[in-house]
Amino acid sequence: MEWYINLFIVLPFVGFFLSLLIPRKKEVWLSRLSFTTVGIQLFSALFFSILWLLKGAHVINLKEFSIFKAKDYDFYIDFYFDGITLTYLIIGALLTFIITVYSQYYLHREEGYKRFFNVILLFYLGYNIIIFSGNIETLFIGWEVLGLSSFLLIAFYRDRYLPVKNAVKVFSIYRIGDVGIIMAMWLSHHLWHENISFFKLNNYELVHEHLAEHSMLGFTIAFMFFISAAAKSAQFPFSSWLPRAMEGPTPSSAIFYGSLSVHIGAFLLMRTYPFWEQQTSFRVFVVFIGVITAVIATMSARVQSTVKSQIAYSSIAQIGLIFIEIAIGLQEVALVHVAGNAFLRTYQLLVSPSVVSYKIREQFYNFVPRQKTIEDSWPRRIEYTFYMLSLKEWNLDSFMYRSMWNPLKKLGSRWAFLTFKNVYYFFALTFVTGLVLAMNPDVVPVRLRAYLPLLFGLIGLLMVIKAFTERKSVRLSWSLIIMNHLCIALAISFNKHFDVSHHIWYLSGVIACGLLGYLCVQRLRKQGEWVSLDRFYGHVYEHPRIASVFLLACLGISGFPITPTFIGEDLIISHIEENQILLAFLIAMSLIINGLASIRMYARIFLGPHVKTYHETAKRSS
C-alpha cells in the first residue's frame, strides 16, 4: 500500500509539469489535463481509503529518502497517513475536481487561462505534500508551495492595482506564519536532538519525558505552531487578510479561501496535537483566541457590503470554532466541521455571482424591511460602537501596519547613506572584518566572542530591512538581499561545530539566483525600460520571459524549495545554540523579510498597471 502514497504526490507533480508544456491557446488540453489529473487522484483516493479501512486502518509512516545527512543532522522526506490525512485527502480531491470542471467554462477565453490551471495544479501539489507530510521539514516544503500559489492566484488580474497590492499583503502575513515554522524547527532540533517525525509524536511516554524536563521549551514550540496555524487560517489578529484575498477569480477564492488552504491551519494543530495535548495552559490559550476570532468575525460578517467578504468572515468564524474543538480534544467533530465548512463555503462562493444578480433584481420588486435583531435591544451607544468597529473590521488591518510594517519602514529609511555605490564599500569592510575574526577567534576577547554572531546577524537584518523599504534603486535592493544571506552565513561561522560544506549548500543557490536576477534587471535596462520600486510598472506584458526568469530567481534567493538554499536554511538554523534565542530570532526575521522583499520587488517591476500609456489600464478601485 505504501506505493499509493507516492502516487498521491507524483500525480499532481506530473500534471503540473505537463501543464507547463501545453501552449497557452490550447484551452481544451489544459482543462482536460487538469480535471483528468485530479479525477484520477480522486478515484485513487476513494479506492485507497476503502482498502486502508478494510485492512484495519493502521497508521502508515513512510521514510522515503534523505536529501542531506551529516553527523548530527538528517534532512529526510517522510510521509504519514492516518484518519486526518484521509479526511483532508478526500475533501481536497473532490473539491479540486469540482473547481477544475467549473473553471474550464468560467474562465473561457480569459487571458490568464493557462496561468490559472498551472497555479491550481501547483497548489494541489503543495496541498498534498502538507497533508501527507511526516515531519516538519516535509510539511514546510508544501507550506511554501501553498504560499506561492496563493500569491499568484490573488494577483491573477495582474493589470489591476488592488489584486497585486493585496497579493503582496497576503504574502506578508504568510511570511509571518513561516517565522513560526522556522522557529519551531529550530527549537525541535534542540528538544529532540533529531528531525522528529509526527509518528514519534504519538509516543506518549517519549513526549511526556521530554516535556517534563523542558516544559517552557515545549510551550514555546506549541506557540510557534499556533502562530503559523493562525496566520494561514486567518485567526485573530491576522483575520483581515482573508477578505483581501478575494481579489482573485471566484474559483480560486472558492478552493483557497473558502475550502482548502484556509483549513490548513486546523490541520497543523491536529497533526501536532499529541505534542501539546498535555499542556493545559496552551489549550486554554487556543480556546481563548478561537472565541475572540469567532465573535469578531461574526460581527464583521454581518455588516459587509460584498458577498465575498461576508463569506470570508463567516468562514473565519467557523474556523475559530474548529480551533476550539481541536483544543478541547474533539478531533473527530473538528474533522466533520472542516468538511462541512469547506463544502458550504465552496458552494456559496461559486454561486455568489448569480446570487448577487438575483438580489439586485429582487430588492426592486420584493423589498422587505430589515427585521429587528437582538442588537436593537441594546443601548444605542453600545450598538453603534459595535457597528462601527465591525464596519472597520476591528481595525486589525491598521493594527498590523502600525505594529509591524511601519516600524520596519521607519527603520529602513534611516539607512539613507546606503546608496548603490556606498553599500559595497560598507559591506566589503564589514564582511572582510568578520572573516578575519572568524578565522582568528583567538584575537577576539572571550567576553566579546559571544556577541559577534549577534552583531553580524543584526547587520544582516538591517540590510534586508533596507532592501524591503527601498523605493528607488532595484539593484541596491537586490544587492542588499544577497548581502543579507552572506551576513547570516558569517554570523553562524562563529558558532561551534561550524561546517564549511553547510555554507556551500546554503549559499550556492543564493549566489546563482542572485546573479540570475541581477542579469534580468540589467536586461530590462539595456532594452530601454525604466525600473524602480516607487510604483507598479507592469513590465510582464512586454517582457513575459524575463518576468518568469526573475520570479524563479526571487524564489531561489528567498529559499523556496527549488534550490539547495531551502535545505541550507535548515542546516544553518541547526547550528544555532539553544541559548541563542535572540540570534535565532534575528536570522528567522532576516529569512522572512528576505523573501518578502524579493516578491515585493517582482510585483513592483513586473505586475500592476503598465507604466506606458498605450496599454489598457484598469481603474484603481476595480
Image (spheres, rainbow, N blue to C red):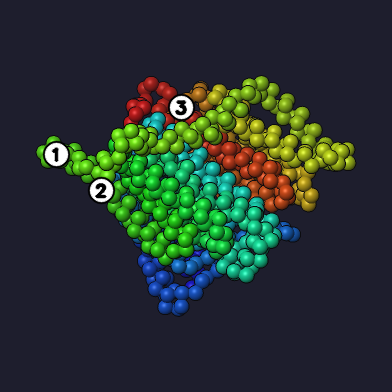
Whole-percent x and y of residue 158? 40, 35
Q: Which residue is mark 2?
A: 351
The residue positioned farthest toward the bottom in the image shown: 55
Disc 3 from disc 2: Cα separation: 35 Å
The answer to whether residue 395 shows anywhere in this view is yes
- Give me the residue at 47% from left, 25% from top: 535
> Which of 431/261 is in front?
261
- Give me the residue at 79% from left, 42% from top: 450
Q: Which residue is mark 1?
A: 367
Whole-percent x and y of residue 6? 50, 65
Position above or below: 149 against 528: below
Disc 1 from disc 2: Cα separation: 22 Å
Q: Nearer the viewer, mark 3 or mark 2?
A: 2
Q: Which is nearer the N-term, disc 3 or disc 2? A: 2
Badge 1 marks a residue whose secondary structure is: loop
- Give me the residue at 12% from left, 41% from top: 366
Badge 2 marks a residue whose secondary structure is: helix
Badge 3 marks a residue whose secondary structure is: loop
- Give me the residue at 42% from left, 40% from top: 240
The amino acid pointed to by label 2 is Val
Whole-percent x and y of residue 392? 38, 34
Whole-percent x and y of residue 357? 20, 40
* Number of other residues with Cα within 10 Å of mark 1, as a class: few under 14, some 14 to 19, many 20 or more: few
Side of 96 relative to 404 (left or right): left
Disc 3 from disc 1: Cα separation: 46 Å
> Residue 27 shows which numbered tag?
none
Position above or below: 558 against 502: above
Q: Considering the image in quadrants, where does the C terminus appear?
A: top left
Q: Which residue is mark 3?
A: 537
* Number of other residues with Cα within 10 Å of mark 3, as a class: few under 14, some 14 to 19, many 20 or more: many
